[in-house]
Image: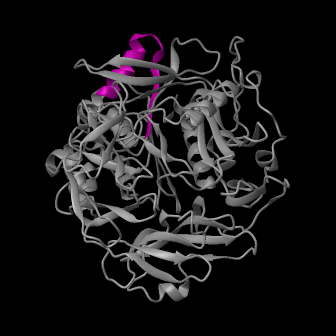
Amino acid sequence: MKWISILITTLVLSQQAFAADNTPPKTAPKLPVEAFASIPDVSTVKLSPNGKHIASLILDDSAEEPHKIVALFNTETGQFHIPLKNDHERYTIIGLTWASDEILLISTLIPSKRFGKDANESLLIKYNIKTGEAGSVLTKKVIKSFEFIPQFQHHIVDILPKDPQHILLSVAGFRSRALEDSVLKVNLYSGKVTIEQNYREHVFKWMTDQQNKVRIATYRDPDTTEYRTYEQSEANGELRLLWKHEAYSEDSVIPLGFDVNPNILFVKAYQDGYFAIFKVDLRDPTLHKELVFSEDNSDVNAQLLHSNITREAIGIAAGIDNEYHFWDQDYQKLIKRLKSALPDTQNYLTQFSKNERRYIVFATSPTQPGLYLYGDRDANRLEVIATKYSQLTPDVLVQPQAMSYTARDGLEIPSYLTLPKGREAKNLPTIIFPHGGPNSYVGEEFDYWAQFFANRGYAVLQMNFRGSAGYGLKFTTAGHKNWGKEMQTDVEDGTRYLIDQGVADPNNICIVGASYGGYAAMMAAAKTPELYQCVISFAGVADVEDLVKLSRFYTSHEMTKKVLGDDYDDLYERSPIYHADKINVPILLIHGDNDKVVQVSQSRDMYRKLSSLDKQVEYVEIDNANHYLSNNQHRLMTFRAIDNFLSKNL
């Protein structure tokens, strides 16, 4: 067990302790694969409401197969213990939530089968820190009263801070055959369940106000891409339509949460083509949106922040860099003090105690994988309590360079270039690394993939090609029905830009990607074989036609058609498997057979196709691995395969 990752010697931080190193960079030592590819030593650090206990997920590397377990730390006594060890083969822990000072809720995923197909189910476990008792929130007795066993049982709607005995849980199947969720009030001690909010047809999300009443319903039309937002004065009340919009339309309005005033709702909506934050008085018949916060030339994707004491909305965590913007002066002062103590990191106030005198900070940067700190405002103290990755320190990591290049049609492509430490940006072996999604983005934050490649001596280019999120509606929708077209040439133009700038060795370039990035990597090798010396695809899409056809069995089908298209002949022609005969460089395919996002058949079919054409292809299929490499061994297997492949081919 890496106890040092949990109980670091108490340290009062100062500006000098985190000052940037201005000495000339030295070449970083080559670290073992485990340093980058292991799951975090510590993650999901949560403070109890009274501020006396810290729960976290830690890596148990003493086990035969290292995996995440729950750990508890008493901030007053300094005692540390493991309340329960999970059977990692049976379930994976994905989250922690304090329901009260006594009850810790543990969200888990369990592999299962639904309708004869592999699926994931979730379970919410309660752990009483006083008695040591643990069990499912929805007891076996309660589950027997359901019409069917719900697939997902971990969606917490409200922890009800004023009622420590109960929580509100969103779950399907209780006294109904409907697939939509009802909101249940669950007693965490007796297990008794009552219906707080009956299901409504096609409503997939419920939101409470600060008085803990179920107020907002989000509806999705199964036959179109239309969304609707409804409001009710109390649970099971008459629904009033507030807004409706098509997905990816400029009239989109997305609820974020209520102020302490139950009539004031904060929403995310577009202003001049970019997401901004507004507040709306629901008593106003025009539903006028008053601007609260916006940024120039980028979307604000915000989380609403509330005071634990007054329940007032006090600020937002917003923007591509998820910075905090408080309109409460007390919090503004705290943020300034944190920045003074931690000048070289982005500092996230992840949680406060109920009286807001104690708090947790997560400090991170591209060269700081993550420090968890415990703050005590009464003692004027800030202490490091854990590191996210114990083997990765700022002295071995490198700062990515923000840059941009111009695509062939004149569009600016925001990008990041990570260079191997101590190496001149000249004629370097290079990794082109398009991100997954594709409706996501790469920003200036720690990226264990990019840092791994840089540590191996490669320059790494990551680009926000059109279709990426965060740069406004027009930029995002420019990627619709564009796979293999301008989205692809954006990647190609980035490769050629690095060659023209003399950064990349034109005879020593590999393109690597995961999910959509894997698609882009395979497609690049097919469309521009002269540019790359090798290809790596993790969980990549090889057959876009098959991806769209498979979506017919899910509620996302209309959305998939909107984003990808539904001309099957065209989709197949824009698929790497259609162009497999043009791939003439070594290619590595990696896929988990428990991937629920991109089916393993995508890589299996691509491997068979390439093999039939006598291409240089390697295929690694990982038993029970998912799309996100949540399992430590699966992540290590993937990175070792990548490391070996690159050492042979680049």
Is 508 within the magenta? yes
**Residue 246 image offset from top left, x and y in percent:** 19, 49
Q: Residue at x 30, y 38 (%)?
A: 290
* Left or right side of 578 for 435: right
**Residue 567 image offset from top left, x and y in percent:** 14, 49
Q: Is residue 202 above or below residue 584?
A: below
> How many numbered discs sit on the rendered protein?
0
Is 500 within the magenta? yes
Q: Quadrant of the N terminus?
A: bottom right
* Left or right side of 280 for 320: right
Q: Is residue 178 above or below residue 613?
A: below
Q: Which residues are magenta?
A: 490-513
Q: Is residue 255 above or below residue 161?
A: above
Q: How is the image coloured?
A: one colour
**Residue 42 image offset from top left, x and y in percent:** 68, 49
Task: Tell me if I can see residue 126 in this picture.
Answer: yes
Q: Residue at x 27, y 63 (%)?
A: 555
* Left or right side of 559 for 625: right
Q: Nearer the viewer, residue 44 or 61?
A: 44
Q: Nearer the viewer, residue 609 or 525?
A: 525
**Residue 236 image offset from top left, x and y in percent:** 31, 73
